[in-house]
Image (cartoon, helix red, strand yellow):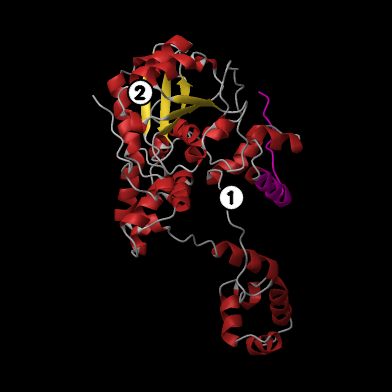
């Protein structure tokens, strides 16, 4: 049997790997730099869950290797510990403890002692969740409800102002999830995060975007009234489709002012099915709460004149390849993948089930709403 040779990275190479990973490069791209497979890069990144470990530095008062060399030379010529301490400008007790814990006068060696001291300094501090079990239980419960770590941290800060022991940062939650050596949050809780990753990706990681179709007689987003842009008045929506297996789709609608979410079951991606579903959902809202709809350039809304005629709702279309122009909807679609994973058949969900999912999502605290847990705009659909 042929065995593969173990791949080692030097300290300098590991530093470069982490630098590139934090800049958002993929493991495959990093591996090409060193002419090695991506699996070898994964072996460097995975032990800490993709979170770069902090650089270790000796304490400012710790003995240096040069000082330990002087101690070793002094012991070899039978100098007293007090004399060695005087020459180094150190306390005699400091030199005495150093020699005693590293082999005594006869066995003391500078390099060996320096490495042993460095190894003994590994005293990991217990994280906040480990020190406060009630806080850990609260975080676990919210994760099971599919709240993101940032939402949990924001909600705790809002719910318990001035109580530091009942608050925790989202970074601490992520570290407790991805670095299992901490032994605080169970690995199974990772399944409740929106991104199903085994390591945490950098915020700079590039996102791939799909191409968009073209719509005839489309009214550009640049012609949208200024009152829509500032989000001051409710009634202006952003929409899109999310897809699943077996040619199944669901229309997603997000109100720009309150971030209120509505999900619409559609029979297919064709414009007839989508427009019919959107018309039906629009009739569930009062006219003053549905004034405009901003969509991307997908062909599913090619029959937008029929929608406007039936609902008196103006439709605006984003510029080509500019999904960020309907950012609230894009962000919501990513959140919805926790409930409607990619590759699953979306047609099995009834409209009642979709409405229940939307209701649960609307009850989650939003950063843009100062982590309030309820929709503030008072939008409600009729039965």
Is 285 magenta? The answer is no
Q: Residue 114: horizontal and vertical position, in percent?
A: 65, 68
- Which quadrant would residue 57 be assigned to in this image? bottom right
Q: Residue 322: horizontal and vertical position, in percent?
A: 60, 30
Q: Residue 113: horizontal and vertical position, in percent?
A: 64, 68
Between the C-alphas of marks 1 and 2, the distance is 48 Å
- In the structure shown, which secondary structural element does the residue marked by tag 2 occupy? helix
Q: Residue at x 58, y 81 (%)?
A: 94
Q: Residue at x 60, y 21 (%)?
A: 212
Q: Residues within 10 Å of mark 1 (few under 14, many from 20)?
A: some
Q: Residue at x 31, y 27 (%)?
A: 285
Q: Mark 1 or mark 2: name the one nearer the start of the chain.
A: 1
Q: Which residues are magenta?
A: 1-20
Q: In the rendering, which numbered label is found on residue 112?
A: none
Residue under label 2, please give it.
282
Q: Decide: is 225 above or below 175.
A: above
Is residue 261 or residue 19 the one in the foreground?
A: 261
Q: Residues within 10 Å of mark 2 (few under 14, many from 20)?
A: many
Q: Residue 364: horizontal and vertical position, in percent?
A: 35, 41
Quarter of the image with the C terminus is: top left
- In the structure shown, which secondary structural element does the residue marked by tag 1 occupy? loop
Residue under label 1, please give it.
52
């Amino acid at each position: 049997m042929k065995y593969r040779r173990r791949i080692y990275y030097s300290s300098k190479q590991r530093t470069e790997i982490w630098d590139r990973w934090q800049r958002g490069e993929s493991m495959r791209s990093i591996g090409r730099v060193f002419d090695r497979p991506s699996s070898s890069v994964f072996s460097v990144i995975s032990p800490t869950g993709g979170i770069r470990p902090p650089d270790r530095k000796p304490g400012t008062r710790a003995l240096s290797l040069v000082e330990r060399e002087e101690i070793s030379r002094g012991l070899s010529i039978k100098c007293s510990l007090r004399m060695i301490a005087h020459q180094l400008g150190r306390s005699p007790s400091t030199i005495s403890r150093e020699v005693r814990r590293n082999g005594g006068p006869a066995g003391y060696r500078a390099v060996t002692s320096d490495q042993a001291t460095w190894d003994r300094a590994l005293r990991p501090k217990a994280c906040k969740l480990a020190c406060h079990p009630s806080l850990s239980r609260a975080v676990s419960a919210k994760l099971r409800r599919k709240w993101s770590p940032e939402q949990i941290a924001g909600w705790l800060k809002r719910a318990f102002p001035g109580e530091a022991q009942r608050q925790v940062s989202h970074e601490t939650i992520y570290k407790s999830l991805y670095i299992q050596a901490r032994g605080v949050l169970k690995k199974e809780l990772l399944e409740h995060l929106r991104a199903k990753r085994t390591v945490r990706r950098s915020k700079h990681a590039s996102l791939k975007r799909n191409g968009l179709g073209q719509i005839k007689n489309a009214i550009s987003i640049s012609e949208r009234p200024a009152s829509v842009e500032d989000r001051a008045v409710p009634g202006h929506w952003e929409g899109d489709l999310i897809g699943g297996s077996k040619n199944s789709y669901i229309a997603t609608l997000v109100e720009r002012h309150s971030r209120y979410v509505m999900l619409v079951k559609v029979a297919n991606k064709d414009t007839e099915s989508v427009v019919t579903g959107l018309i039906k959902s629009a009739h569930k809202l009062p006219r003053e709460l549905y004034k405009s709809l901003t969509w991307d350039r997908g062909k599913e809304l090619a029959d937008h004149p029929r929608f406007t005629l039936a609902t008196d709702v103006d439709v605006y279309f984003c510029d080509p390849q500019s999904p960020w122009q309907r950012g609230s909807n894009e962000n919501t679609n990513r959140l919805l993948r926790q409930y409607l994973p990619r590759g699953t058949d979306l047609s099995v969900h009834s409209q009642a089930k979709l409405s229940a999912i939307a209701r649960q999502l609307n009850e989650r605290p939003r950063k843009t709403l100062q982590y309030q847990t309820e929709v503030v705009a008072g939008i409600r659909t009729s039965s």
